[in-house]
Amino acid sequence: MTVMFCDLVDSTGISARLDAEEWRDLVGSYLDAASAAVTEMGGKVAKKLGDGLMVLFGYPVAQENDTERADSAAADVVGGAARKLRWTRRLGRTIMIGW
């Protein structure tokens, strides 16, 4: 089994620039996009932890390419989910995702 974690980089700094509703919307948009990306690669979202995800590949049945699928999902999350977020313009900076 392969475990992947991902979250918003500098989430504390970002949250300080937004009101509570905007922060909730940002995190929700990110988690939805990231969840879709990992699910598409066969990952299972095990937990949503604040602004982060814990994802399992190879659960409940391990596959030979669990690590490769996790790596592809991470690339999709970092590239795709960040571009889809409309918050980049609102914040005046790029949203970055760490994994």
Image (spheres, rainbow, N blue to C red):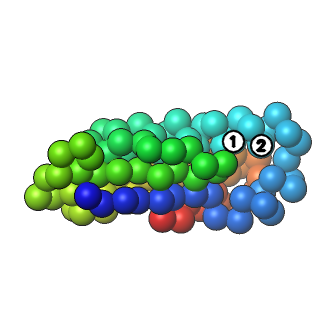
Q: Is 79 situated left or right of 39 in this image? A: right
For the point 30% across and 60% down, the residue is: 2
Q: Is residue 78 above or below residue 27?
A: below
Is 35 placed left or right of 7 in the picture? left
Disc marking residue 23: 2
Q: Quadrant of residue 92?
A: bottom right
Drawn side of residue 51 relative to residue 16, left or right? left
**Mark 2: few/some/many CA within 10 Å (<14, 14-19, 20+):** some
Q: Residues within 10 Å of mark 1 (few under 14, many from 20)?
A: some
Q: Quadrant of residue 72?
A: bottom left
Furthest residue in direction front, as rendered: 60
Please say if 79 is above or below 40: below
Horizontal side of 30 relative to 44 (left or right) equals right
The answer to whether marks 1 and 2 mark residues whose Cβ atoms lie closer than 8 Å is yes
- In the image, what residue occupies the spot 29% across and 51% down? 57
Of residues 1 and 6, the one nearer the viewer is 1
Secondary structure category for the residue under label 1: helix
Q: Residue at x 41, y 50 (%)?
A: 55
x and y percentages locating residue 56 in the rendered image: 35, 51
What element does badge 2 sit on?
helix
| Residue type at tag 2 | Trp
Q: Can the viewer see residue 41?
A: no
Residue 39 has which mark? none
Outermost residue on the left side: it is 64
Residue at 60% across / 37% down in the picture?
29
Q: How many numbered marks are there?
A: 2
Give the residue pinned by disc 1.
26
